[in-house]
Image (cartoon, coloured by chain):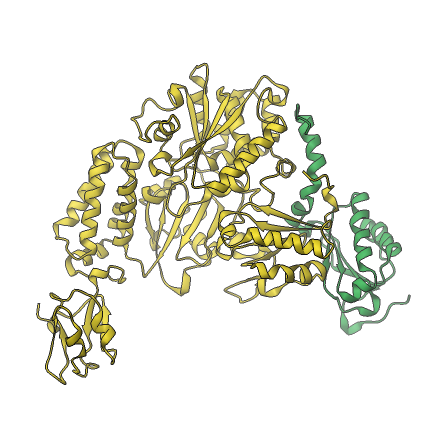
Chain colours: A yellow, B green
Amino acid sequence: MEEQTMSQYKMHILVCGGTGCRSSQSGLISELFQDELLRKGLKNEVQVIRTGCFGFCEKGPIVKILPDNTFYTQVKPEDTAEIIDEHIIKGRKVTRLLYLDPDTQEYVSDSKHMGFYKKQLRVALRNCGLIDPENIDEAIARDAYQALGKVLSEYTPEQTIDIIKRSGLRGRGGAGFPTGLKWEITSKNPADQKYVVCNADEGDPGAFMDRSILEGDPHSVLEAMAICGYCIGAGKGLIYVRAEYPLAVKRLKVAIDQAHQYGLLGEHIFGTDFSFDINLRYGAGAFVCGEETALIHSMEGKRGEPTNKPPFPAQSGYLGKPTNVNNVETFANVPVIILKGAEWFSSIGTEKSKGTKVFALAGKINNVGLIEVPMGTTLREIIFEIGGGIKNGKKFKAIQTGGPSGGCLTEKHLDTPIDYESLTAAGSMMGSGGMIVLDEDDCMVSVAKYYLGFIVEESCGKCAPCRIGNKRLYEILERMTQGKADPEDLDKLRNLCNVIRDTALCGLGQTSPNPVLSTLNNFIEEYEEHVFEKKCRSGQCHDLLYYVIDEEECTGCGACKRVCPVNAISGEKKQPHIIDQKICIKCGSCMEKCQFDAINLKNEYKSTTVSV
Amino acid sequence: MTEIKTLADLKKKQEEVKSRIDLRNKAENPEARVQVKVAMATCGIAAGAKKVMEYFVEELEKRNIDAIVTQTGCMGYCFAEPTVEVILPGKEAMVFGYVDNVRADEIIERYIKHGELVDGIIPQNYDTIEQEER
C-alpha cells in the first residue's frame, strides 16, 4: 500500500467498479484518469478510486467527483481528458455528462437532488460507491470491524443475539425468517464445531443485490459472519458464492486476506479467545442451491439437492454440524445494527418488517439499477419516482417481484407499502429483491411461461411434483401461446399449480407455480383471450398473430399469391385478395413482397373475411 | 502491517486512516460545513489562486476547521483575482477578492472562526457593485 498521506489529495475521482459499469469500460476509464493526472502533474493532488456499485446502472459508467459531489453519467473513455481539463483543472462542470432530469429537462449535478436517490436510504449499501472495496483501511475509516470489536469486548453472545432480535432484522434472502431467532436456535444446539454460512448463491433472473454488496463492501459481510460466529459458538465461516461472480470472488479473497493481516480474522481476534476463519466455496450456478439444505449439500461436495426439514441446518447442517445460514444482505445489516442500536434499526420500516431492502430494478423502466429503500415504501414510489417511470412513455402493466418464486403485481397494488406480509398477501413475495417491470407490450402468459421455463431448467429433479409437474405446466402454457389450448386447460393449469404448491419437497418447488398463479389471478382475461379467442393482445405470441390483407389497399396484383409457398392466398385479378388463416404458415413472404403495404400483422382477424 | 489486538487499536487505526475518506464523508452533506470555493479559471490561476487554494486546504486542516475546499470556474470578478467564495453553514455566500495567503489567514481567523467581516469583500449584487476601497 502506498504510504502517501491521503489528506494531501484535494479531490477524489470515484469510478464505479461494479460489474455493470466495468462491462462498459470503467476499468479503462479509471486508468485513463490516472494517466491524464500523471501527465498534468496532478497525481499527488487528485486520487482515483475504484468503488463498488453506485446503483444507477442505467446511466453507467458512473464517475463521481468530490468534494463538490458532481455525478457524471455514461462516461466514455474519451471523456476523461475533458473531465480533467475542465472540471479538475478549471473547475467547470462538463454539463453534457451530467444527469438530465427527464421531468424538468434540467441538468442535475449533485446526486442528492436526483429523483433516483431522493427516496433511498442506504444501510446495507452504505459503503457501496464510497470506498475502495480492495482497501481495508477505507472500510475501517467507515467503521468496519468496530461492531465486532464492541461485541467481543462488551457483550456476551446472548446480549448480542438479543440486540439482533430486538432490531427486528429478518432474512433478506426471501422468506423473512427472524435473524436473531435463527442465531439463538443455532447457539443452543451444542456441538464441538459449528458453521456460519453466507448464502451468496444469488440466482433470480435480473437480481444483483448480493453481488453488488460483495463487490462494493465485502468487509461488512466478513465482519457480520464473525459476529454471528461469536454468537452461535462457531469458529468457521463459509461463503457459498457462485463462480459466475468472478469479481465478487476476487474482492472477497482480497478482503479476507487483508482482514487476516490485521488480525481481524484468524486466531484470538481482538486479543480474546474467539477465533474465526472464513473460506470460500464456489457454486456452479444452480438455482436450487440457493435453498439452504441444497446449498449445504453442494458445499459438502454432494449433488445440490434439497432434503426435508427437519432436521434444520441449525440442528444438523454442514458435515452434520449445527449451521447458521444467512443471506449476504442480511449479514451486511448486522454491523450497523450493533453500532447504531436495535432501536435505531427498528425505527425504520413497517410494524413487522424493519429496516431497508435492496432491490434490483430491471425491465421496462427508465432507471435500471440497484436501489435501497425503507420497508413500507410503495411500489408507486419505486417505479415512478426512483425508477423514473416506464420506458418510452408506455403504460405500466405489472411488476414481477421475488423472482421465479414470486409473482406479478398490478396497478391496484401500486400503493401497497412493501413489506414481507403485504407482498405475500398480494400474491407475490419479497424474495431476494429482484423487480422486473412490465409494460403494456408484455404478454402475461409469455411471462409466466418464461419463469416456468427457468424452473423446468433449474429443477433438481428430486421430487416428482417439481420435476414432472412444472414440465406439464410449461407445456400447457406453451399450448396457450401457440393457440392450441383447450378450454379445460385453464382449469388444469390452476389445479396442477395447487398440487405442486402443496406437494413439492423444498421451498423452491412449492413456490414455483407462483408466477402462474399470480398472473392467473390478476390477468385472467389475457389467459382467456389466448385460450378462447386465440388472441394475444400485446402481440408477443407469434403464433397468435395473423397476416391480414387490407381490402382497401390491395390492388389485386397477385404478387403475394405467387410468392405464398402454401397457396393460402386467393383472389381474382384486380380484386382484393384474402389469406386463409387455416393454411397460412406465417412465413411473412407475402408481407415482404407486397409493394402497397396492404398486408399487416394483426393480433386478431375478422372471421367474416376468411373462410374458416 | 501491525495487528489490531484491541478495540482501542482499531479506533487508533481508524484515526490514522480516516483522512483517506474524509473528503467523501464530507461531500455527503456539504451544507452543514464551511465551504470555501476558490475561483480557478485561467486568470485566477495566473493570479495565484492555486497557491491560495493549497493554503486553505492545509491551514483549515491544521486549524481543525471542518471545511470543504473546492474550486470553481471564473466568478467574473477578474479585477479582484484571486477570488474566493466562503459559505458558512446557514449563511449567505460571501466573496472575497485579492486573496493572498495573508488575506486567507485573515479570512480563516476572523470570518470563518468568528463571523467578522474582513477587507476585500466583493458585493455579490451586480447592480450595486462598487469597488471596495483597498
Residue A162 sits above or below residue A456 on the image: above
Is A580 on the left or on the right of A525, as rendered? left
Residue A202 placement: quadrant:
top left
Q: Position of residue A260 (x, y in %)?
A: 59, 28
Taking the spot 48% from the left edge, 48% from the top edge, the residue there is: A370
The furthest residue to the left: A611
Residue A200 placement: quadrant:
top left
Q: Nearer the viewer, residue A384 or A66?
A: A66
Taking the spot 48% from the left edge, 21% from the top edge, the residue there is: A232
Q: Position of residue A53 (x, y in %)?
A: 53, 47
Q: Nearer the viewer, residue A436 or A423?
A: A436
Let me know if residue A420 appears in the view: yes
Let me know if residue A416 appears in the view: no
The furthest residue to the right: B134
Q: Position of residue A275 (x, y in %)?
A: 56, 20
Is A450 on the left or on the right of A96, as rendered? left
Residue A238 sits above or below residue A366 on the image: above
**Quadrant in the picture for the N terminus of chain A:** top right
